[in-house]
Amino acid sequence: MSRKDIQIRTNPSAKMYFLLNENLLNPISLPLIGEGTYIKYTGGSKWAHIKLKIQETENHHSASLIWNIPEPDFPKVFEDEIIDALRTFLIHYEGLTGENLNVTFEILEANYHEVETGKGNFYFAVANSIFNAFDKSLHEPNIEAVRKYKNRT
């Protein structure tokens, strides 16, 4: 029986969370609001924008997500990528501190283009919104580009 080598890829945003370590090791003052964009200019524009609120939760055993924007304004097709990005952050926090971070993430605003925005674009926009929530110097959202791309047909 032949054996096939399986490539195991790391998550690029997991490395970026290292930049948050100092912020995460200090007491966290909630609520936090972060805004994130992801814009890729090569091979046609790919972009996504999200604004999140991170707040205390009433459920002290897990984190949760409040999806405030109804379909079709923000389709659930992006849900898996958003949850994966939040899960990556929570795993990083728990691995760093040895504690659970029981919070509620609330989507306050989201922008996308039905053709130009891929599901994976929201993964990085969410990660960037978390960086922005904890340290504005780690990510400055490009709202001007979002407005420009959002209004394209």
Image (cartoon, helix red, strand yellow):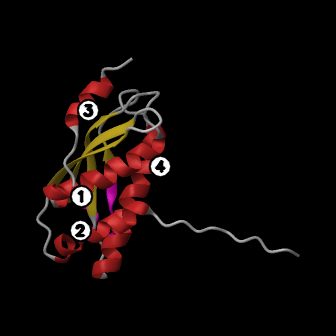
Seen at 32% across and 27% down, the residue is 149
Q: Mark 2 and 1 residues: CB-CB less than 8 Å, in contact?
A: yes
Question: How many neighbours does mark 2 have within 10 angstroms: few (below 14), some (14-19), or many (20 or more)?
Answer: some
Q: Quadrant of the C terminus?
A: top left
Find the magenta span and give its range.
56-64
Above or below, comparing residue 5 to residue 137 in the picture: below
* Foreground of the two, 23 or 78: 23
> Looking at the image, is mark 1 or mark 4 nearer the viewer?
1
- State left or right for residue 45 relative to residue 127: right
The tag on residue 145 is 3
Q: How many numbered dots are placed on residues in this image? A: 4
Q: Give the mark nearer the N terminus: 4 vs 3.
A: 4
Q: Type of residue at label 3? A: Ala
- The picture places residue 126, in percent across and down from the top left corner, at 32, 50
The residue where tag 2 is placed is 20
Q: Give the mark nearer the N terminus: 1 vs 3.
A: 1
Residue 62 at least partly seen: no
- The picture places residue 31, in percent across and down from the top left corner, at 14, 57
Seen at 47% across and 27% down, the residue is 115
* Foreground of the two, 141 or 91: 141
- The picture places residue 120, in percent across and down from the top left corner, at 46, 46
Say which quarter of the image contains residue 93: bottom left
Q: Type of residue at label 2? A: Leu
The residue where tag 1 is placed is 131
Q: Type of residue at label 1? A: Phe
